[in-house]
Image: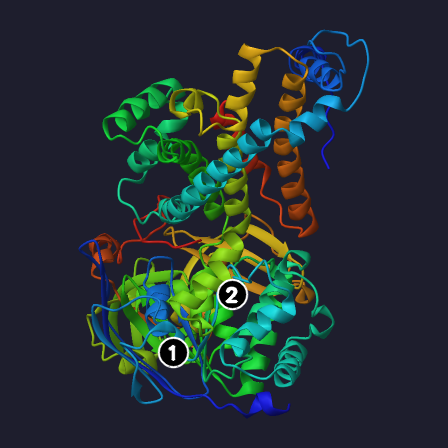
Amino acid sequence: MRTYRIGWGGYLAAGLVAVFFVLPLIIIAISAFDNSNLLGFPPTGYSLRWARVLLTSPDWTNSMQTSLRVGLTAAGLSLVLGVPLGLALGRGRIGRSRAVQALVLAPVIMPVVTLALGYFFLSADTHLLNTILPLIIAHTTLGLPLVVIAVLATVRGIDASLEPAARTLGASPWRTFRSITVPLLLPGIVAGAVFAFLASWDDIVNVVFLGTATIRTFPLQLWTQMQYNLTPIVATAAIFLSMVGIGLVSITGLIFWARRRRISGQVAENILLRRGV
Amino acid sequence: MTDIGATSGTPVDLRGLRKQYGGVEVLHGIDIAVPAGSFTTFLGPSGSGKTTTLAITTGLIKPDAGRVEIGGRDCTRLPVHRREIGFVFQSYALFPHMSVERNVGFPLKLRHVSRAEMHRRVGEALELVRLSSYRKHFPSQLSGGQQQRVALARAVVFHPRVLLMDEPLGALDAGLRVHLQREIVRIGRELGVTVIYVTHDQAEALTMSDQVVLFKDGNIEQAGTPQELYGAPRTEFAARFMANAPLLPGTLESSAHGILIRHAAGATPVSAESVQAQGLSSGAPCAAVLRSEYLDPVPDRDGSGDTAVSRLLIGRGTVADVIYAGARERLSITLDNGVELDYYYDSIDGLAWHRGDRLAVSVRPDKLPPVVPRDTASQADAPAAEATADGPPETGERSRVQAHSR
C-alpha cells in the first residue's frame, strides 16, 4: 500500500474537481426527484414521479432499447475486430506495428463531429440514412480503438513463454489459444467491451447526425426532450444515463476484484487518458 | 517411488543442426549424442547457440538443416505438442490463472487422464518436488524457488522420457541455486529421465552433469565429462571458461626433464600426457593452464632458491592482494613479467601472506599443468612474449605477456 501526502496543489485539484465535476452531478441528482412540471433549482417538492414516467413512457423505453441494441452490437463488432487486432499488434505479428497502431487509434483523436459528418454524407449517398446501420458503424469506430488499447495493454503484460510452455506440455495451437491465451486476455477483453459499450451509450454527436425519428437513442431522446419541453425528466434521464455507466464499471470492477485478477492500473489509466476523460 | 519412477530415459541425437537468423548463421552444424538417462549440460556464454539448440530439440524453433532424433525416431518435423518432452523455462512459465494443482494437472488433462488418476499423479509429482501442501496455491503466492519446483513437477508429471531445462535457476539467488541444483539431479536420477540442461554457469555444469557440451559462437568447442573439460581443456577458450584459468603463453620444448613450455620468465615443465593427448609437438605455440591447484608459491626473501625449485619455477613476483573468503583465502600474485595468477588455500592452514611479499611460484612436481594450443586470434600476442623469453624480466616493466585475471 502506498500512502499519498496531499500538498496544496492536490487540494486545489481536488477542489476544482469537486466544483466542476461533482457539483453539477449533485444538482442534477437532486433535480431528478423534483415533482414540479418545470425544471428549476432548488426543487419545491420531491417525488419519484418523473422516474416513473421515464420507465413507462414508450418514447423513453423505446429509446433505451435502441441504445441498448446499438451499444451491444457496436461493442460486439469492436470485440470481433479489436481482439485479434490487439493480439496481433501486441505480439508484433503485424509489420510496422507503430504505423498500424496509429491508424487504428486515429478515431480517438479525430474530432467526432468530422467523422459523424462523413458518415452522414456517406449514408445519405448509399440510402442507408433511415437504417440503424450507419450508427452501428460509427459507434464501432468509437469502440474499436478502446478494445485494441485494452487488449494491447493486457497482451504486453502476459509472459511470452506461457504459450510455448503450453505447447511443450502437449497442447495444440488451438487448445493453447483456448486454455491459455483467452483466459489471460479476458480482463482486457471485458474492459474493452465495457468501454466500447459506454462510448456508444453516451454518444450524442454521431446520433444527432445519424439518428432519425424512428432510430432514436436514449441521449438523442434526452436532447430532443430538452429542446421541446424542459421538465425535470431531463435530469432524471441524465442520472439514469450516468447510473448505467457507473453501474457497469462498478460491476466489472467487482468481478475483477472477486476473481483476484485486476486489470492493471496501467490499463485503466491508458484507456482514460486516451479518451481524454 | 511409485509409478512416476517407472519412466526410463531415451537417447537424443542431434545431427548437423544449422540455423540462420536474418542471414546470420547462429548454429554451424551441431552434432551431439545424449545417452539415455544421462544428465547433459549445454554450457556457454550468451549467444553461443546453446539455447537455440535446446529450442530446436523441443521443436519451438525449426532448424534450417539437420535432424533431431529422440529414441531413434526422427522428430525434426514433429510439432512441439507431439514430442512428449518436458521443458522447464527460466521464467517458470506457470499459468497465472491456474492453481498449482491445475498447472501440474494441465498436461494430464490434455491426455484425457481420469480425475482420480490425475489427482494421484499430481500428488506424486508435487511430492517429488516436496510441495505437497501447496496444491491450492496460485503461482503469485509462491516464491521463485517454489514456482520453479512447480514448473519441474508439471514438466515431469506426464512421464516424458526427456527433460529439457533452459537456465532454470538463472533467476534465483545463490543459496537457493545450490539447493535446487541437488534437487534437480536427484529428481533426474529418481525418474531415470534423460536430462538436457542449459546454463552459462560453469560451476553448475561441473557439479551436475555426466556430460558437458561447451558451446562457442554456434559451434561445439569441446564435449566430455566434467573432469575432461576442467582437467584437460582442449582450447584456450575452454580453459578460460571452465575455471577462469590464467594462461601462460609460450612454446613447447623437449628436454631431459620432460616437456617444457618456454615462456617470458624461463621454462616450466608441463603435463606430457596433455601434450600427447592433443598431438602437440616441439615448437608449437601453446599456453600452460596455471590454475591454483598446480601452483606452489614459496617465500622468496634472498631472490635465489635451490635447483630443485628452479627447475619447476614459473617466475618470481609479488603478492598483489590477499583476499579472505571464509573457508579459503585467495592470493593474487603478479609475476615480475606481468602474468597474474591466483592461488587458493584453506584459511585454516594460516599461511601468513601479506601484500607486497616477494615469492617464487613453481609448479608442483607431482602434478604438472596441462597445455592448450593457442587460439589463432590471440597468436598476435605470442611473438612479443617469445621475444622477451630469454631476457631477464626484472626491468619492472610489464611485458606484453597476455595475462588473464577475471
Task: Depth check: give the residue in front, A18 or B339.
Answer: A18
Task: Depth check: give the residue in front, A275 or B162.
Answer: A275
Q: Position of residue B252 (x, y in %)?
A: 25, 71
Dividing the picture into quarters, in which one does residue B199 lie?
bottom left
- Which residue position is annotated with label 1? B82
Which element type, helix, strand or loop, lies under badge 1? Answer: helix
Which element type, helix, strand or loop, lies under badge 2? Answer: loop
- Which residue position is annotated with label 2? B168
Task: Depth check: give the residue in front, B305 or B358.
Answer: B358
Residue drawn at (64%, 90%), measured in percent from left and top? B1
- Is residue B212 visible in the rendered image? The answer is yes
- Check the image and report above or below for A276 versus B187: above
Mark 1, Cα crowd under 10 Å, few <14 / some 14-19 / many 20+, is some
The colour style of the image is rainbow
Quadrant into which the N terminus of chain A falls: top right
Amino acid type at image mark 2: Pro
Amino acid type at image mark 1: Arg
- Check the image and report above or below for B142 versus A192: below
- Check the image and report above or below for B349 versus B71: above
